Amino acid sequence: MGINYIGFIGIFVGILALGLATWSLLQLRSLNALRKIFFTGSTSKDLEAVIHELTEGLHTLQSNQLILENRIKNLKNDQLLGIQKAGVVKFNPFDGASGNLSFVIALLDAHNTGMIITSIHGREQNRIYAKQITEGKCDIQLTQEELQAIERANTHHKNLISK
């Protein structure tokens, strides 16, 4: 009975080996079919040429990325010089005679450089004044309303940034 048992195990191992050999053969045929598709035909290239082409494409992308990063840096620097802060104050310079039709607008960049435009509205005329602001300072004395407009521009900007 021991010999039959050993024979049965031998037959089982043989069938298992035959199955693994068949599976390996099918895998090999599948791999050969893929190899033929990849490496044959009018558009086929050898693997070295494909790797070389991909490497050149990667270098091109890297150089384009550096160019774009420099452009973004320049745009960020340019953006600092544009108007970023604005403050408006309406007021009545004539003690109730003309309503709150007069106003001050402060237009400033990131360095508090820009201008203040003041419009004083009267019954018969309207006067407009412009003052240059450099780093938050002006060569001409600023009125209380103009200082308030600068403060509003800075406060409004800080509130936008903190959100």
Image (cartoon, helix red, strand yellow):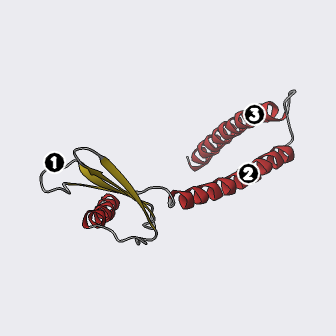
In this rendering, the label closer to the viewer, 3 or 1: 1
Instruction: Mark 3 or mark 1: name the one nearer the start of the chain.
Output: 3
Label 1 crowd bin: few (<14), some (14–19), many (20+), radius 10 Å:
some
Numbered label attached to residue 107: none
Numbered label attached to residue 58: 2
**Residue at image location 20% in from the left, 57% down from the top:** 93
In this rendering, the label closer to the viewer, 1 or 2: 1
Q: How far is mark 3 from mark 1, CA to CA?
A: 85 Å
Label 2 crowd bin: few (<14), some (14–19), many (20+), radius 10 Å:
few
**Residue 75 image point, x, y percent:** 57, 55
Instruction: Mark 1 or mark 2: name the one nearer the start of the chain.
Output: 2
CB contact under 8 Å: marks 3 and 1: no
On screen, residue 118 versus residue 21, left or right, reads left
- Identified by mark 3, the residue type is Leu
**Residue at image location 45% in from the left, 65% down from the top:** 113
Q: Which residue is mark 3?
A: 34
CB contact under 8 Å: marks 2 and 3: no
Give the structural element (helix, strand or loop) at label 3.
helix
Above or below, 31 against 119 in this view is above
Q: Nearer the viewer, residue 152 or 50?
A: 152
Above or below, 5 against 72 in this view is above
